[in-house]
């Protein structure tokens, strides 16, 4: 049995995962960081504190009798692989991985949070073969709205940003509108549930600049609708339609430039059924299963197993 440990301490989720590379099974444990009602996030110092508090309990839940079978550790070290990409919250996972590496006498492999999202998406739909093939991966969340050209043939999941948001991230728009409507942060699931109560066909127009998008206009329009007394379900549906229009538009322009590559969609926003349905009608694409769309450590555990074989 070859067990690989994954650790991810992102801005809003503490996550650990054990991956059995022989059976393909995972044991995944995660916990959201607490955010007070009405607030739109956490300071990094608070995120670090909560990770330190939550990580030991998750290790205890996940490890069971597997600690002596762990072959390697995969950990998120930064949001992206680009130079200068850094968030203090990831240092908690790095510290834990370093300590465990010394105790267990196993190697540590470092990956970006973004690489972990891509790997988790591919694992969830049994498409790990794409880790070694050129493809397009969208990472759409509260911290990122980017499309990446992934080139697995000339390195290990090397990525190049080919399209991005020029202002708000999609998850930021969802959370800002959600909090405005009185929902709990993070607002994705509640806003989707509210949006599905509206069956109107809402036409939206988003701004694209080349292959990039602009999303801040969606917040302005949602605020205007609220002042005008529009139904909250309508505002929620508009918000999802606005984001969907942007992702669909970006996907079309990327396909025009890069041709018939596989498209993979990951990140918490991509678990939304409205957005997924719009993209499915556009082309064949790979979506992370909902439980692997939001922040998780499955991707870093899977990547550790792949890296260990190179």
Image (cartoon, rainbow, N blue to C red):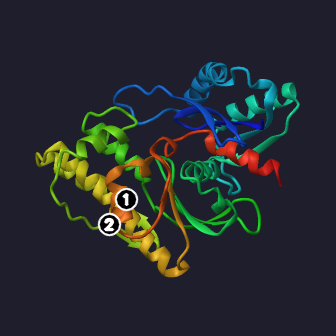
Is residue 77 at least partly visible in the picture?
no
Q: Quadrant of residue 4?
A: top right
Task: Please indicate whether residue 13 sits to the left or right of residue 301 in the image.
Answer: left
Element under disc 2: loop
Q: Quadrant of residue 16?
A: top right
Residue 289 badge? none
Element under disc 1: loop
- Mark 1 neighbour density, 10 Å: few (under 14) some (14–19) many (20 or more): many
Residue drawn at (66%, 60%) of the image: 129
Depth check: 220 or 22 in front?
22
Rendered location of residue 166, percent (x, y): 46, 62
Q: Quadrant of the N terminus?
A: top right
Task: Please indicate whether residue 223 sits to the left or right of residue 138 in the image.
Answer: left
| Looking at the image, residue 210 lies above or below residue 267 | below
Residue drawn at (52%, 80%) of the image: 257
Rendered location of residue 228, percent (x, y): 11, 49
Rendered location of residue 3, percent (x, y): 75, 35
Q: Give the mark nearest the N terminus, 1 or 2.
A: 2
Residue drawn at (85%, 24%) of the image: 103
- Mark 2 neighbour density, 10 Å: few (under 14) some (14–19) many (20 or more): some
Q: Quadrant of residue 98?
A: top right
Mark 1–mark 2 distance (CA, rounded to whole Å): 7 Å
Residue receiving disc 1:
215
Cβ atoms under marks 1 and 2 closer than 8 Å: yes
Q: Which residue occupies the extreme left position in the image? A: 229
Count of labels in the image? 2
Rendered location of residue 67, percent (x, y): 77, 24
| Looking at the image, residue 231 lies above or below residue 208 | above
Residue receiving disc 2:
206
Residue drawn at (55%, 37%) of the image: 11
Task: Please indicate whether residue 171 sits to the left or right of residue 133 in the image.
Answer: left
């Amino acid at each position: 049995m070859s067990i690989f440990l994954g650790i991810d301490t992102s801005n809003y989720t503490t996550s650990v995962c054990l991956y059995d590379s022989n059976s393909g099974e995972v044991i995944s444990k995660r916990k959201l960081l607490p955010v007070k009602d009405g607030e739109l996030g956490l300071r990094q110092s608070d995120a670090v504190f909560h990770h330190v508090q939550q990580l030991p309990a998750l290790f205890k839940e996940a490890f069971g009798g597997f600690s002596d079978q762990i072959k390697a550790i995969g950990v998120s070290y930064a949001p992206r692989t680009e130079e200068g990409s850094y968030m203090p919250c990831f240092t908690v996972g790095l510290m834990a991985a370093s300590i465990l590496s010394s105790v267990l006498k196993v190697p540590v492999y470092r990956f970006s949070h973004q690489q972990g999202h891509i790997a988790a998406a591919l694992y969830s739909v049994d498409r790990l073969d794409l880790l070694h093939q050129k493809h397009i991966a969208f990472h759409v969340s509260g911290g990122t709205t980017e499309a990446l050209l992934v080139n697995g043939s000339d390195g290990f999941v090397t990525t190049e940003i080919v399209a991005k948001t020029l202002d708000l991230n999609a998850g930021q728009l969802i959370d800002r509108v959600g909090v405005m409507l009185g929902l709990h942060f993070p607002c994705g699931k509640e806003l989707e549930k509210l949006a599905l109560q509206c069956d109107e066909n809402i036409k939206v127009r988003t701004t694209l600049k080349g292959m990039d998008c602009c999303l801040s206009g969606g917040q302005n329009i949602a605020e205007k609708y609220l002042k005008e007394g529009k139904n909250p379900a309508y505002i929620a549906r508009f918000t999802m339609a606005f984001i969907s229009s942007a992702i669909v538009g970006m996907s079309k322009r990327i396909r025009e430039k890069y041709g018939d590559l596989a498209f993979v969609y990951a990140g918490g926003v991509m678990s939304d059924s409205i957005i997924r349905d719009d993209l499915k009608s556009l082309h064949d694409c790979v979506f992370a299963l909902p439980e692997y769309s939001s922040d998780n450590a499955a991707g870093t555990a899977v990547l550790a197993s792949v890296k260990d074989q190179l």
